[in-house]
Amino acid sequence: MRRFFFIPILSLFIMASCNIRNQREKEVAKNENQLPANNQKTTIKMIDSVFNFGKIKDGEKVVFSFRFENTGAQPLIIASASPTCGCTVADKPDQPVAPGERGFIKVVFDSKGRVGPVHKEVGIISNAEPQMPNLVLTGEVVSN
């Protein structure tokens, strides 16, 4: 009897994960449409792309600003900064970053209920060529 109960529940989890994936794919496509239509690409230099926050207590928040520099000849437009999880929030620049200027993407990780090793990523969509790498937060959350 347990087996028959387990199968419908597993099916619900699979359908829910597929729905989340489809929503993210739609969001990425929408954000890509915010990039310049004339295909003007620029180049960037990442100053920070990985941050290890070490050990923190459950419930603490980590705030870090990943820095980059527009090394190209066109304004850098960041269409989206999408975290892989709801416990992480990314704040991208609202305005284009001019050639030669520096910018940052602020990332906030809320550790509440996340005890254990942490590896969170933020995907970036921009007009940089090559694309900006995923921003990575790592560390460990320990119980109080």
Image (tube, rainbow, N blue to C red):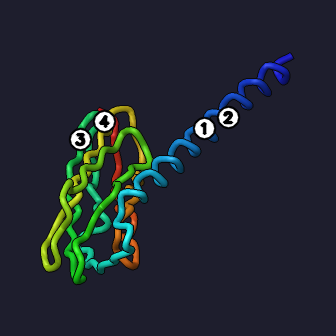
Q: CA distance from mark 4 to mark 1?
A: 30 Å
Residue 31 at x, y = what percent?
Answer: 40, 54
Q: What is the three-letter code of the residue carrying label 4?
A: Asp
The residue at which mark 1 appears reads as 19
Q: Is residue 97 left or right of residue 124?
A: left
Cβ atoms under marks 2 and 1 closer than 8 Å: yes
Secondary structure beneath dot 1 equals: helix
Q: Is residue 140 left or right of residue 71?
A: right
> Which circle, 3 or 4, is nearer the viewer?
3
Which residue of the protein is positioned furthest toward the left in this rendering?
101
Q: What is the three-letter code of the residue carrying label 1?
A: Asn
Q: CA distance from mark 1 to mark 3?
A: 29 Å
The residue at which mark 2 appears reads as 15
The residue at which mark 4 appears reads as 58
Along the line of sight, the residue nearer the viewer: 32 or 69: 32
Residue 62 at x, y = what percent?
Answer: 23, 47
Q: CA distance from mark 3 to mark 4?
A: 9 Å
